[in-house]
Image: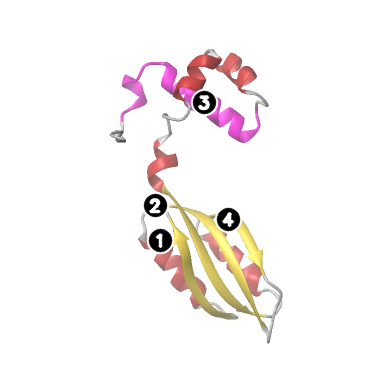
């Protein structure tokens, strides 16, 4: 039985190892270091300490403030429609993760767009409504979200 739970704690009161594990994870994710050995050496922790805590330590924004949302849109086959939608995602601060557009059939194309949103769930619905109101958009739906 899994009895784990999450607690938000200021890094000011944590042992030094936890912020260092977060820094190693950041260095690896951003490609600033190519291996965990070099990232651990740069930060000043052992690889064993990193491997011990890496699956348990997350930055607050990684676990609690980011939402991955997948949208399905049916778009008219007209120049600039997809581009304007992607620009709207960008304008509202969404990080676009994937875009998958199908070939147009009968003048419309299906598009799946997965984005990372920051903030509350209301932003996902607001963005959906803003996209739905754009020229060339036939329909917009949520596929999934976490």
Q: Residue at x 44, y 73 (%)?
A: 129
Q: From the image, tell me which residue sits under label 2.
A: 119
Q: Position of residue 126 (x, y in %)?
A: 41, 67
Callout 1 secondary element: helix
Compared to residue 65, the image places residue 4 above or below, namely above
Q: CA distance from mark 1 to mark 4?
A: 15 Å
Please identify the quadrant where the C terminus is shown: bottom left
Kindly identify the residue that appears in the image at 55 percent across and 31 percent down.
26
Quarter of the N terminus within the rendering: top left
Marks 2/1 in contact by CB < 8 Å: the verdict is yes
Helix or strand or loop: what does disc 3 sit on? helix
| Range of residues picked out in magenta | 9-32
Q: Is residue 109 visible?
A: yes
As measured in the structure, the alpha-carbon distance from the residue carrying label 4 to the one carrying label 3 is: 24 Å
Q: Residue pushed farthest front?
A: 1
Q: Quadrant of residue 15?
A: top left
Residue 28 in the image, given as x and y percentages of width and height: 60, 30
Q: Is residue 126 left or right of residue 107?
A: left
Which residue in the structure is indicated by mark 4?
A: 96
Determine the CA span between mark 2 and mark 1: 7 Å
Mark 1 sits on what residue?
Answer: 123
Name the image quarter holding residue 98: bottom right
Q: Earlier in the sequence, mark 2 or mark 3?
A: 3
- The spot of residue 135 in percent (x, y) is 58, 80
What residue is at 68 percent from the left and 80 percent from the top? 77
């Amino acid at each position: 039985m899994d009895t784990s739970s999450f607690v938000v704690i200021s890094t000011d009161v944590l042992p030094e190892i936890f912020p260092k594990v977060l820094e190693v994870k950041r260095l690896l994710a951003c490609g600033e270091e190519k291996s965990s050995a070099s990232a651990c050496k740069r930060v000043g922790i052992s690889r064993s300490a990193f491997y011990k805590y890496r699956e348990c330590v997350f930055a607050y924004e990684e676990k609690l403030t980011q939402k991955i949302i997948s949208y399905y849109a049916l778009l008219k086959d007209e120049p600039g429609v997809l581009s304007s939608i992607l620009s709207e995602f960008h304008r509202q601060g969404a990080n676009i993760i994937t875009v998958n557009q199908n070939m147009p059939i009968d003048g419309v194309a299906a598009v799946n767009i997965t984005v990372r949103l920051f903030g509350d769930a209301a932003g996902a619905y607001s963005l959906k409504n803003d996209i739905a109101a754009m020229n060339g958009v036939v329909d917009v739906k949520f596929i999934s979200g976490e």
